[in-house]
Image (spheres, rainbow, N blue to C red):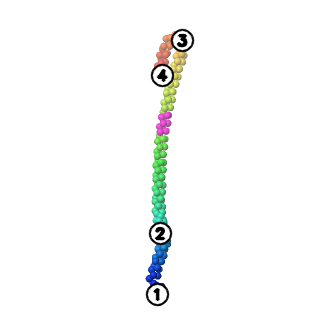
Amino acid sequence: MDLKFFTVETLVIQTIILGIVLWVLHKFLFKPYLKYLDEFEEKQKKIENDYKNIDNLLLEAEEKKQAIISEARNTSKEIVVNAEELAKKKKEEILVSAENDAKAIIESGKAEVEKEKLHMLDQVKEKLTWLVLKFNEKLFSSEKVNKDFVEKELSQIK
């Protein structure tokens, strides 16, 4: 066997060349590729976590939706109850107001009837006095004495 190819100098040169090749491979191939693999792995983990979180987010969203719907129903029931109570109060106020207005109209009507009654009674007294005096004048020919008596008697009539 001829060992001329394996001299110390060739061995040192081959080692240096191998080191340079390994350094170039490491610098320009392995290091960027390992960095790419690490980033890819992080992205995959993030996607997996996001996928797992989606289920949790969906459950939370469903619970929030149910809570909002429940709250809206309760609020709408409260609004209906409040509206009914307000309507009842308004109805009572309207009834009381109508009763008061009716009473006022009745009182006003009674006062007007009473006023008209007194006015008519005064007119009747005047006409009656006039008639009685005319009648007395024709019968007795003395107007003065009879007029005082008739007015006194008519003033007692209410």
Q: Earlier in the sequence, mark 4 or mark 3?
A: 3
Give how far apart the Cα atoms at labels 2 and 4 are: 122 Å
Q: Are marks 3 and 2 in contact (CB under 8 Å)?
A: no
Nearer to the camera, 77 or 142:
77
The residue depicted at 52 percent of the width and 25 percent of the height is: 116
Image coordinates for residue 148, horizontal then vertical, percent? 48, 13
Q: Earlier in the sequence, mark 3 or mark 1?
A: 1
Give how far apart the Cα atoms at labels 3 and 2 are: 144 Å
Tell me which amino acid carries mark 4. Lys
Q: Is residue 34 visible?
A: no
Tell me which amino acid carries mark 1. Leu
Image coordinates for residue 136, horizontal then vertical, percent? 53, 13
**Which residue, given by chain and number where applicable, does mark 4 sit on?**
158
Tell me which amino acid carries mark 3. Glu
**Which residue, given by chain and number where applicable, does mark 2 sit on?**
35
* In magenta stretch: residue 98: yes
Whether 116 is drawn above or below 9: the answer is above
Secondary structure under the numbered disc 4 in the rendered image: loop
**Which residue, given by chain and number where applicable, does mark 1 sit on?**
3
Q: Residues within 10 Å of mark 1 (few under 14, many from 20)?
A: few
Eye-nearest disc, 1 or 2: 1
Eye-nearest disc, 2 or 4: 2
Prevailing secondary structure class for the magenta stretch in the rendered image: helix
Q: Is residue 147 visible?
A: yes
Q: Quadrant of residue 135?
A: top right
**Which residue, given by chain and number where applicable, does mark 3 sit on?**
137
Give how far apart the Cα atoms at labels 4 and 3 are: 26 Å
Image coordinates for residue 124, horizontal then vertical, percent? 53, 20
